[in-house]
């Protein structure tokens, strides 16, 4: 028996003994863990699962052991993913620390930055947020104006960021700032890290159409950032920022969970589309909906696209020399946004008028939740880089078309 076969059997046995049964079910809103202690998960078993996986180094399995990982090689990582998916295991830890800044620091961080931040991320002790977009710099991110002045041992940061996801729960922020206002806009940007408890940081939640406030506007008034928290080189932050976005868009972190089709899949119903159609076929309004040939075709096509997407992610990991590919991550982002939006429209047709329940006893808790998520999800083809931006990247960086 090969060493890889031994690893598979050992992994399977360990998961059988250590993964709580409640962690082998679909994730429910509020039960996920994103790190830190400002927003606690609602399920105690989630913390048991996190502690066990972190001790094993499997919250960040390909990271070096010195930084809280398990130093798994590619083939071992793929085996671990397969065994986690086989038992529908939930991810032990999510958040921007795991999926974005952690992998980026592995490539661009100093030894000191890696030692200070990565083990804490892998253990789920610190939650992170992203300081990219500004009121006047969204898709054209390089137009950002938040400035950082060199004050010797530190930078003095002034400005604001908007759509700062989870800022009210975050312990630290990774932030793009302008350090040379005279340089061409892509060349005068630097990448800083700082604590959200720093004097001068103010957070104001933004209430959305769905009634929630996952986003914030964040203000910086003379925030002092030590130079040891400059990532890479001064005025070369755009290089770091682009790489971080590739990690975000890849969705590869989601492969190690039961929700294998990407981070947007909390939008899914609690059952498959086919099961959902069967359920609503029992109502007077939607009688025999499961027999609708057009609807059945739409469900099958959407499920096929989702499966192809997941297989392509897995194949990309298998073929890549590093965990996250390059510009091809824009393909993942573009395709996922499209099929998730399509899935939501199919859900609406299945549910009929029950898809539009904001509140009231005539709607179930899931129907109300899905109605609000449907409203929130209209932004998925914009967030993380709009579809138009992704198509430009694919045209230039993947297909090699001229500017």
Image (cartoon, grey):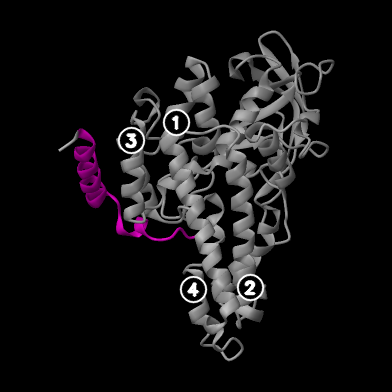
Query: Which of the two discs, 4 and 2, sits closer to the camera?
Result: 4
- Residue at the outermost left position: 1
Q: CA distance from mark 4 to mark 1?
A: 41 Å
Residue 315 against residue 145 in the figure, above or below:
below
Q: Choose the circle earlier in sequence order: 3 or 2.
A: 3
Q: Residues within 10 Å of mark 4 (few under 14, many from 20)?
A: some
Q: Earlier in the sequence, mark 1 or mark 3?
A: 3
Secondary structure under badge 2? Answer: helix
Residue plotted at (81% across, 30% down): 143
Label 3 or label 2, whichever lies nearer to me, is: 3
Q: Which residues are magenta?
A: 3-29
Give percent across and percent down for residue 26. Answer: 43, 60
Kindly identify which residue carries mark 4: 274
For disc 1, the marked residue is 120
Q: Which residue is the extreme one toward the top?
A: 152
Q: Spatial distance from mark 3 to mark 2, Cα to Cα?
A: 41 Å
Task: State how far apart marks 1 and 3 are (Cα).
Answer: 26 Å
Marks 4 and 2, the one that precedes in the sequence: 4
Residue at image x 72%, y 56%?
208
Disc 3 target residue: 75
């Amino acid at each position: 028996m090969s060493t890889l076969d031994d690893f598979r059997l050992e992994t399977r046995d360990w998961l059988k003994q250590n993964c709580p049964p409640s962690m082998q079910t679909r994730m429910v809103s509020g039960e996920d863990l994103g790190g830190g202690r400002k927003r606690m998960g609602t399920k105690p078993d989630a913390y048991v699962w996190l502690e066990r996986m972190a001790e094993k180094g499997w919250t960040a399995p390909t990271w070096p052991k010195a930084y809280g990982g398990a130093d798994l090689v590619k083939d071992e990582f793929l085996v671990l993913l397969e065994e986690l998916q086989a038992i529908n295991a939930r991810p032990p830890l999510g958040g921007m620390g795991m999926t974005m800044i952690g992998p980026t620091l592995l490539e661009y961080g100093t030894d000191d930055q890696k030692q200070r931040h990565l083990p804490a991320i892998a253990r789920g002790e610190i939650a992170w947020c992203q300081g990219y977009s500004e009121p006047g710099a969204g898709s054209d991110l390089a137009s950002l104006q938040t400035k950082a002045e060199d004050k010797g041992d530190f930078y003095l940061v002034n400005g604001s960021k908007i759509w700062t996801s989870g800022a009210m729960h975050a312990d630290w922020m990774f932030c793009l700032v302008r350090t040379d206002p005279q340089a061409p806009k892509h060349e005068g940007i630097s990448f800083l890290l700082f604590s959200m408890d720093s004097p001068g940081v103010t957070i104001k939640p933004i209430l959305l159409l769905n009634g929630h406030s996952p986003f914030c506007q964040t203000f910086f008034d003379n925030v002092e950032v030590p130079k040891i928290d400059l990532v890479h080189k001064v005025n070369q932050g755009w290089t770091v920022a682009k790489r971080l976005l590739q990690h975000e868009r890849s969705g590869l972190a989601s492969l190690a969970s039961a929700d294998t089709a990407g981070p947007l899949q909390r939008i899914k119903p609690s059952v498959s589309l086919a099961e959902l159609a069967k359920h609503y076929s029992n109502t007077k309004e939607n009688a025999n909906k499961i027999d609708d040939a057009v609807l059945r075709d739409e469900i099958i096509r959407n499920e096929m696209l989702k499966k192809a997407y997941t297989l392509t992610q897995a194949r990309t990991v298998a073929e890549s020399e590093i965990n996250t590919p390059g510009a091809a991550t824009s393909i993942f982002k573009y395709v996922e946004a499209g099929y998730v939006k399509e899935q939501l429209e199919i859900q609406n047709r299945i549910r009929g008028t029950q898809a539009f329940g904001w509140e009231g006893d005539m709607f179930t808790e899931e129907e109300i939740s899905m109605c609000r998520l449907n409203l929130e999800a209209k932004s998925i083809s914009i967030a993380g880089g709009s579809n138009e931006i992704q198509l430009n990247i694919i045209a230039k960086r993947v297909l090699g078309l001229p500017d």
